[in-house]
Every structure is written in C-alpha cells, then in structure tokens.
Image: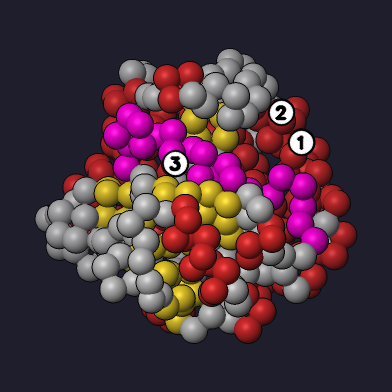
Amino acid sequence: MNVLDQQANAGAGVVRADMEVDEQALARWMRANVEGFSGPMTVLQFKGGQSIPTYQITTPSHSYVLRRKPSGVLLKGAHSVEREAQVQQALATVGFSVPKVFALCTDPAVLGTPFYVMERVEGRIFWDATFAQVSAAERPLYFEAMNQTLAKLHSIEPSAVGLESYGKTGNYFSRQISRWTRQYLEDEAAGRNPDMDLLVQWLPEHIPAGDETRIVHGDFRCDNMIFHPVEPKVVAVLDWELSTLGHPLADFANHAMMYRMPPEIVAGLAGADLHSLNIPSESRYVQAYCERTGRNSIPDWEFYIAFNFFRMASIFHGIKGRVIRGTAASAHAQERAKSFPLLASLARKALEACR
C-alpha cells in the first residue's frame, strides 16, 4: 500500500453523512449493556475498511470500537458482525490475541442494523508489508510473530472453544470456489471479466486431495493486526468478517500471498528487495509455518496461491458492486474497485503457474 493510501486509511475522522449513528440511542444501549460505561462520549469513524462501518467511541475513562452491519441491499451471508463477535469471544477463552468483546446488539431498532462493541487495543498497525518503520535487524521478528500467531490459530480445535458449528466441515475448497463463483456471477452490477470466467471453470477441476478443518481467519494480513507498541508481538488480530471453519492451508496461503501481492492493491511485497530489507523469503516463511504445524512440506502450494488470488479478486469484484450500488462503507472503496481487473489478471497468472 502506498504512502497516500496509508495516510488515507489511518486513524479516525468525522462520521460520514451517510454513516451516522443515533448517539443518544447508542449511549442508552451502552449504559445498559457495557459494563463500566459512562458518558459523555464522542463518536468518530475509522477511515480504513471496505465493507463494515467501524467507529471509535471515546469517553473520559475508556475507548471502544463499534462495528456495525452496513445498511442497504447486501449479499447473503456477507458483513456478519454477529459472527465476528462470536469468534472473538470464543478465541478469547483460550488466550488467543483478540480484542475483548463487551456486547453484541442484534436489535435493528437501536442503530438500524446489528452491531457489537469491543475494546480498543493500543499498539501499532503496519500498513506496509515491508515493515519500513522498524529496523532491518528486528524485521524478521515481526514476520516470525505473524507466522507464529497464525500457526497458533490453526492449532486450536474448534470444539475446544465451542466453534464446532461455526462453519461446514469437509470439501472446503469445493464449497469456497462455489461460493465466490456464485457471488461473482450474481453481482451483475459489477460485470464479468474473462480472467475470472476462466478461473471459475479451472479451479474446481484441480482441487488437491485430502482435507483438514480448523478455524480460519480469512484475511490475515499485517494491516489486520495490532502489534505491541514497542515489541515484535501481535497483541490483537482484527477483522474477522471472513472467518469460518476451513482448510488451514488455504488460510496460510492467503496470508503468504503477500510475497506476490503488489503493494498498490493491499499490503504486499511484490517488487521488494527482500534480501536488503532482511525479510525471510517465501520458501523460508512456508518452512517456518510447516515446522510450527508439524508438516514436512505443502504439496500443491501453487494451487493454494491461485485459489486465494481468485478469492481476493472475487472480494474486490464485490467492492466494485457495492460502489456501484452505493453501499460501500469506505470513502476509498472506489479506488479499491479500480484494482479488480489487475487482481483478476494476477489470479490468472497464478493459474498458469499451476499448469
């Protein structure tokens, strides 16, 4: 992500006119449902994010984050803040690094759509996957922290935290390819793309054998984590909108895709001089994950990369559709929508590498 995009997505500002909340209704609800809440409060809107409006709520003694389902016509199953709250509450019981969820509201009479309130975790968010703000000597430790955190998530048995019904089990790739294909084809407003049309035909015919089921984040990137203020340590993983039960290798490949991702699309390392930056190579990063999860290697690695480029292209196609329909949560969604054709092209290139 370039410097201008980093600045555009950092911090919170005045709530957009089409994203305002009823502050009096919210204050009444928080007094009744959030332990320790006491006004007065101020409400700002975070600039980043594409699909779920997110707000900063500040009182004299506390700082909170509110995430709400967007209004308007939504694709089935998308933007589920209820699931976000559920998975974070469950993972907190085993000490996984997530913000504390104070309360969930499913009554649309309060703010118009469901929402939840969680703690605001203090720390650093790195929008640039090169971790340019830290020293070259420390940089590998930040990659180790990300790798270790995702390996820890994938080590948690869903049934151990009450998430055995958080998603379907088995045939993960078949179901996911079908889901994103359906969303791509049904979003007529965003149009069709020849690279995507090829992918929806090729991917289901080349799914690797074998299956595993774990809790998957679905969007595990450096800018979806909060790092300790001074240490190379992940203190909170954010943005669980795409989480479900799924194949851990799909989740890890989605994360490791950063090595091939142009930074102008999302936080990526494509084109970066890894050696001079002292960033571990893609192969070393994959090996570290294997060591942490008891694997010797990851056969069919290129398929997992191709699948995830396709999946992300489908997500950006959805952003394009929301921009056209006027339901995009971020003021920068239009710029993201413009990146869809390039991302679809990258997905096809990954497919060709598989061949």
Check disc 3 and give the amino acid type. Gln
What colour-coding does the image apply? secondary structure
At label 2, counting other C-alpha atoms closer than 10 Å, the crowd grade (few under 14, some 14-19, many 20 or more) is some
Above or below, 277 relative to 179: below
Q: Residue at x 80, y 61 (%)?
A: 73
Q: How many marks?
A: 3
Q: Which of the pair 328/4 is nearer the observer?
A: 328
Mark 3 near mark 2, Cβ–Cβ under 8 Å?
no
Q: Give the secondary structure at mark 1.
A: helix
Quadrant containing the C terminus in the rendered view: top right
- The segment highlighted magenta reads 73-97
Percent of width and height locating residue 202 = 75, 36
Quadrant containing the N terminus in the rendered view: bottom left
For mark 2, what is the residue?
Answer: 174
Q: Can you tell which mark lies on residue 305? A: none
Q: Which of the pair 95/339 is nearer the observer?
A: 95
Q: Residue at x 25, y 44 (%)?
A: 145
Q: Residue furthest top?
A: 210
Residue 303 picture quarter: top right
Mark 1 near mark 2, Cβ–Cβ under 8 Å?
yes
Residue 9 picture quarter: bottom left
Is 175 displayed left or right of 250 in the figure?
right
Q: Give the secondary structure at mark 3.
A: helix
Percent of width and height locating residue 121 = 31, 57
3D distance between C-alphas at marks 1 and 2? 6 Å
Q: Give the secondary structure at mark 2.
A: helix
Q: Residue at x 49, y 38 (%)?
A: 87
Which comes sooner in the sequence, label 3 or label 2? Answer: 3
Q: Can you tell which mark lies on residue 88? A: 3
Above or below, 46 relative to 175: below
For mark 1, what is the residue?
Answer: 178
